Image (cartoon, coloured by chain):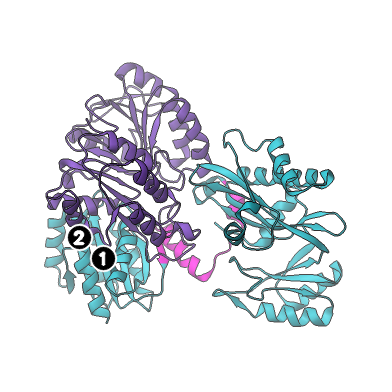
Amino acid sequence: MKIHEYQAKLIFKDNGIPIPDGQIAFSVEQGLNIAKQIGFPVVIKSQVQVGGRGKAGGIKLSRNEQEFQKSAAQILSMTIKALPVEKILIEQALNIKKEYYISIVMDRQKSKPVVIASKEGGIDIEEIAKRTPEKIYKLYIEPEIGLLPYQARMIAFNLFYDASIAFKVADIINKLYKIFEEKDASLVEINPLILTQEGNIFAIDAKINFDDNALDRQPEIVKLREVTENEKKELDAKAKGLSYIQLTGNIGCMVNGAGLAMATMDVIKKYGGEPANFLDIGGSSNPQKVIDAFNILNSDKNVKAIFINIFGGITRCDDVANGIIMALGKLNIGLPIITRLIGTNEQKAKEILAKSNFNLISVSSLSSGAKKAVELVT
Amino acid sequence: MSILMDENTRVIVQGITGRDGAFHTKQMLEYGTKIVGGTTPGKGGEKVHGVPVFNTVEQAVKMTGANASVLFVPAKFATDAIYESAGNGIKLIIAISEGIPTMDIAKILPYLKTCNCRMIGPNCPGIIVPGIGKIGIFPTQIFQKGNVGIVSRSGTLTYEIVYNLTINGLGQSACIGMGGDSIIGMKFKDYLELFEQDDETDAVVMIGEIGGTDEQDAAEYIKKHFSKPVVAFIAGKSAPPGKRMGHAGAIISGGDATAETKIKVLKHAGVTVINEPEEIGKAVRKILAI
């Protein structure tokens, strides 16, 4: 789960990590009032949950009222990577002397958290890693022990020569790890962490992603969730036990199992088609799930054909077949439907589908189903 | 010889009185697995499909001599259940449970190492060794005894590939679903090391997907140390970046995590990479020259 920068900064503030003075605004007028309170110059930052806001023009400095009105109006009318900007963060502009990078992420390869720090901040860390890997400092943390104070100092003294500043940064790294562990984050990132002309340290950007597996024990974090249009559909599906992601193609897919669902999309693409979605109906045989899945596919206007690919294990093919019949009886689906049901009770499933009056195209393999689907939409 | 389980594997089911635990206990027994006991705190003394239930793993191990455990407990209690097994001398844990917090698993793994305990999963279908038994939820009817080892990050996609092997006359020495989470116990390389030692395995099928760099680590190992032929399929070529595709671990979070990168690295290590599941039978027959 992702949250906005301003939400992450509030978590930073609660934990004593220094951030610039600032507040969130939903309109130019509201923003202007905040800017006047803080005092010019201020920075206007669009709040959308994607990277590359700066490059897209979603972050601007304004030195006075006129500049503010122009820039704020412009940013509030922007759409960044398909996400409309609805909120702006107004912050005091600081005198930046130098920018640094600090993050903590769960390293999959080593199965441990890793602290990543660099004297180069403010740009994409993958860029830094590619261009100047020697400028990246990495320290793996033993998860059962946690980050030790000396480790935080080690990282800080790698970035800063001046002891008084290094102590401040070590303190920030300790607090960052506390957030990472206590809030079940999968990523906490300060990019950039800045040193001001006056010798102070601030986190002027903040990013926190959370481990979806741990949300049950993080009710306060779940409250921060802001759902976009697309995510709404995905979360509704999740509440019904389905895993759904909308894509841009026209072949609707209904599959059991995430790996097989991905493979089904891949094979459709291999034969020249475009999948409209990823949809995993999971491991249970409840016919209601099949009905819910049909409802989702039916609500996507791009879908021109539906390919149902089920490999029965725990999921029984006859249950899925019954679900298909019930769904078609209830819903008005005017699209060609290709079915491939194999595995547990496939014979029974074939009989159920054959007995019905619905016009279903039955295929025996993933490849033949994908080919048929592509043929029907082209 | 086979990998991870043999005639001496004695299994307890943690969470045996739950719906899934009871159902799969029956399935595992029917396939010939030595299920010697189960645990559910507070339900000691009961029986599930004739299998005695104990209150604690300590009692279960003492009374049955169990050396492996399979978890059907809800995610909320799964972390504790893993510690309980490892702390009582269990040497192989199969964690079927889905949704265990990542940090919990990261903290458990070093402890498992000190206990000399291996873990398959979490969020996995388990292991099946045709002719010996299965620990987990694999549908048994598609399997057949043979000489192809399979290790996979997926569930039903594995069934699809196993089915194709079986109808092409290629049986399996062992099949493992290692789990769809981002932090898991044993990984591709660990299983490959076991398959390398196993004289019943002549070829290995690897089923990977987007996310992480485990396939790359496996490729590195294969290039340097693995003597048997490997065929791989990587799912998720058509997956958009930044989106979690069902499995918690199936997300493209950087250039290295894409299907294209993994396929390239595996091919470079001499692995045959197929483009769709149905090509598997043909590809394995070709590398085994049959």
Rounded to the nearest angstrom, the CA distance separating label 2 from label 1 is 8 Å
B257 sits to left or right of A84: left
B122 sits to left or right of A84: left
Q: How many marks?
A: 2
Q: Which mark is residue B270?
A: none
Part of the protein shown in magenta? A218-245
Callout 1: 10 Å neighbours few (<14), some, many (20+)? Answer: many
* Chain letter for mark 2: A
Q: Is residue A229 magenta?
A: yes
Quadrant location, the N terminus of chain B: top left
Q: Which mark is residue A341?
A: 2
Q: Is residue A151 magenta?
A: no
Q: Earlier in the sequence, mark 2 or mark 1?
A: 1
Q: Amino acid at mark 2?
A: Leu
Q: Position of residue B266 (x, y in %)?
A: 35, 54
Q: Is residue B75 above or below residue A233?
A: above
Callout 2: 10 Å neighbours few (<14), some, many (20+)? Answer: many
Q: Position of residue A42 (x, y in %)?
A: 80, 70
Q: Position of residue A92 (x, y in %)?
A: 81, 66
Q: Position of residue A202 (x, y in %)?
A: 77, 56
Q: Give the SS element for disc 2.
A: strand
* Towards the viewer: A159 or B69: A159
* Chain letter for mark 1: A
Q: What is chain B's hue in the picture?
A: purple
Q: Which mark is residue A308?
A: 1
Which chain is represented by cyan in the image? A
Q: Give the SS element for disc 1.
A: strand
Q: Is residue A213 above or below residue A233?
A: above
Q: Are marks 2 and 1 in contact (CB under 8 Å)?
A: yes
Q: Amino acid at mark 1?
A: Ile
Q: Is residue A14 above or below residue A69?
A: above
Residue pictured at 33% horizontal, 50% vertical: B154
